[in-house]
Amino acid sequence: MSYTIHVSCRFQAPPEEVFRFHDDPANLTRITPSFHSARIARFDPPGKGSRVRVALRLFRIIPATLEMEFVVYDPPKRLTDEIREGMFPEFRHQRDFQADGGGTLLTETVQYTPPFGTLGRLVDPIAIAPALRSMFAYRHRRMKELLDSVH
């Protein structure tokens, strides 16, 4: 069973700049909450088929690895990655960048299958989905700090 989350945020920066921010793996560590301490272990040059491998310490104690592959790379309109290795059996993260006045409306759509089978489906509404929404809210605040401060 798959679940979907939609989140949006407006930035003062143009779509090209917001897209470039997202296709630079180094920025992932800048927008990941510090209690998950992300480190880029590997990244390919940006483009369709490129992969990013992230070493995490969830809540600073649980080691985890995440490998994503860019399956759609259409600058500056759309960027989509899928998890190839990680705790989620399915996780597809689509970002749409739309010109909005002099800035950008970023709409993110995540389709995922919760980890841990039946248990994951049961706890999704009270734990997994809220944690994902909270992570995206944090990421949007950080991106606004980083991108809007120069415009």
Image (cartoon, helix red, strand yellow):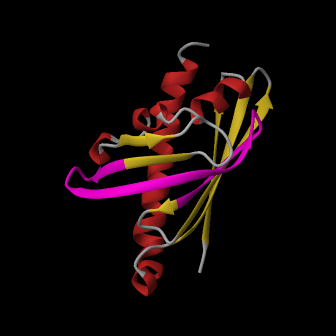
Whole-percent x and y of residue 21?
A: 58, 29
* 21 is higher (above) or lower (below) than 28: above
Residue 78's quadrant in the figure? top right
* 127 is higher (above) or lower (below) than 59: below
In terms of secondary structure, what is the magenta stretch mainly?
A: strand
Whole-percent x and y of residue 31?
A: 44, 36
Whole-percent x and y of residue 114?
A: 48, 73
Q: Residue at x 47, y 68 (%)?
A: 88
User: Which residue ends up furthest to the bottom in the rendered image?
Assistant: 118
User: Which residue ends up furthest to the left in the rendered image?
Assistant: 61
Residue 45's quadrant in the figure? top right
Q: Decide which of 145, 47 is in the foreground and name it.
A: 47
Q: Decide which of 78, 100 is in the foreground and name it.
A: 78
Q: Is residue 11 visible?
A: no
Q: Residue at x 44, y 48 (%)?
A: 53
Query: Is residue 75 rendered to the left or right of residue 56?
Result: right
Query: Is residue 131 rendered to the left or right of residue 13?
Result: left
Magenta highlight range:
55-83
* 114 is higher (above) or lower (below) than 119: above
* 124 is higher (above) or lower (below) than 82: below
Residue 97 falls within the magenta-colored stretch: no
Q: Is residue 146 visible?
A: yes
Whole-percent x and y of residue 141?
A: 49, 34
Q: Decide which of 135, 54 is in the foreground and name it.
A: 54
